[in-house]
Amino acid sequence: MIDELLKKENFTQEDLSILLQSGKEDSNKIFTHAAKIKAEQVGKKVYYRGLIEMSNICSKNCYYCGIRKGNQEAKRYDIIDQDILDAAKYAYQSKYGSLVLQAGEISTPKFTKRISRLLKQIKELSNNELGITISLGEQPDEVYQEWFDAGAHRYLLRIESSNPDLYYKIHPRDKKHDFDNRLNCLKSLQRTGYQTGTGVMIGLPFQTYDDLAGDLLFMKNFDIDMCGMGPYIEHEDTPLYQYKHLLKPIDERFRLSLKMIALLRIVMKDINIAAATALQAIDPIGREKAIKVGANVIMPNITPGMYRDSYKLYENKPCTDENASDCTNCLEVRIGITGDEIGYGEWGDSVHFAKRINH
Ligand code: SAM
Ligand code: SF4
């Protein structure tokens, strides 16, 4: 039955839900099929995006996140511009090709200007060669436009869950955490001209297989260019922690995440799919496993070491006590195991995006 299902051109929510629930043997068939599609459509290559977690100050209160505004336990930081630029220089010199600037959500004219300035400086220090992805939450159209004009060309904004009912179980039901606004922001990013990335958390309390199947179809219907999705990992100092007893065991959340990645590769053959850091928090070679089943982007953490421990979204975040070069060395060896090569110095833009805009 699984062989017949995998041959289909268009999957229904029910098909995907069945595939997500498959056992070990059938999952291996899904993984093999996804790996074949990846090799044919985007090649056996992995692209780096050096990740700079520039600040854990956030104005929002998502119920799952360790750096939410209401968490008094979180030690707040905001990396000074020079240290961000040094990390960007490190990415450039290490031939990473691209970097990601990520932070809590701040919407002030001062923050907008600071990001614009940093984007221009990063472009300058890298001879316009570093590609820049940003992940700075929901912002007005003009801000997205200003940052695009300043040099960012990809944006990551996870929808977290495409089912509004589930969305409001993991976010406060108020103006600041409005589902429709998040959706409109994604549309705005696409209109502005960004390579647009989204994603979801996998294994959330209250989440069903149908929800996850719906998430895959949401990404297809939205025609996204990139995806970063990974397992939900609980954090003690967050409201969602009270539902810990509803969670699937962590290794099951991990396997489900691999299945989501593989199925997304099958459903959206030519997009960029990132192997999320949260996978590594569960399994030391979790990201490499994701590369083998369809992912083609990895985000080595190049946040200066002294800040890393404070960007704690969830428990057991990996590599918080290492410096950037430790990570680079160990990563190269580990990606070698997957049989893929690293696209050093390449942007590795989404093939899907190129087709979408030339259409
Ligand atoms: N503030 C921006 C935003 O929310 O889009 C960007 C930074 S935010 C920390 C990046 C992502 O971290 C979120 O989209 C969310 O999916 C993920 N995240 C937060 N808490 C998490 C948790 N407990 N487990 C797994 N992922 C988590
Ligand atoms: Fe803030 Fe993003 Fe965490 Fe939500 S997920 S609390 S917006 S950092």
Image (spheres, helix red, strand yellow):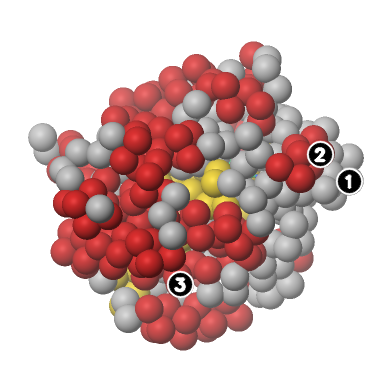
Residue 186 versus residue 132 in the image, above or below: above
Q: Earlier in the sequence, mark 2 or mark 1?
A: 1
Q: Position of residue 68 (x, y in %)?
A: 75, 37
Q: Tell me the element at label 3.
A: helix
Label 3 CB sits under 8 Å from any ligand 1 atom = no
Quadrant position of residue 38: bottom left
Q: Disc 1 on helix, strand or loop?
A: loop
Q: Which residue is mark 1?
A: 73
Q: Is mark 2 within 8 Å of ligand 1?
A: no
Distance (Cα) linking label 2 and label 1: 17 Å
- Identified at 63% across, 23% down, the residue is 168
Query: Residue 318 location in percent, x, y?
Result: 66, 67
The residue that disc 2 covers is 242
Q: Is residue 242 visible?
A: yes
| Cα–Cα gap, marks 1 and 3 | 32 Å
Q: Residue at x 72, y 34 (%)?
A: 63
Residue at 58% over, 27% down:
166
Residue 288 circle label: 3
Q: Is residue 324 above or below residue 145?
A: below
Q: Nearer the viewer, mark 2 or mark 1?
A: 2
| Amino acid type of the residue that numbered disc 1 sits on in the rendered structure | Glu
**Mark 1 or mark 3, which has the lower sequence index?**
1
Q: Residue 277 placed where, x, y %?
A: 56, 60
Q: Quadrant of residue 217?
A: top left
Query: Where, quadrant-wise, is the C terminus in this rendering?
Result: top left
Query: What residue is at 24 percent from the left and 43 percent from the top?
Result: 353
| Real-space Cα separation, disc 3 to disc 2, in angstroms | 32 Å
The mark closer to the camera, 3 or 2, is: 2
Q: Nearer the viewer, mark 1 or mark 3?
A: 3
Q: Earlier in the sequence, mark 3 or mark 2?
A: 2
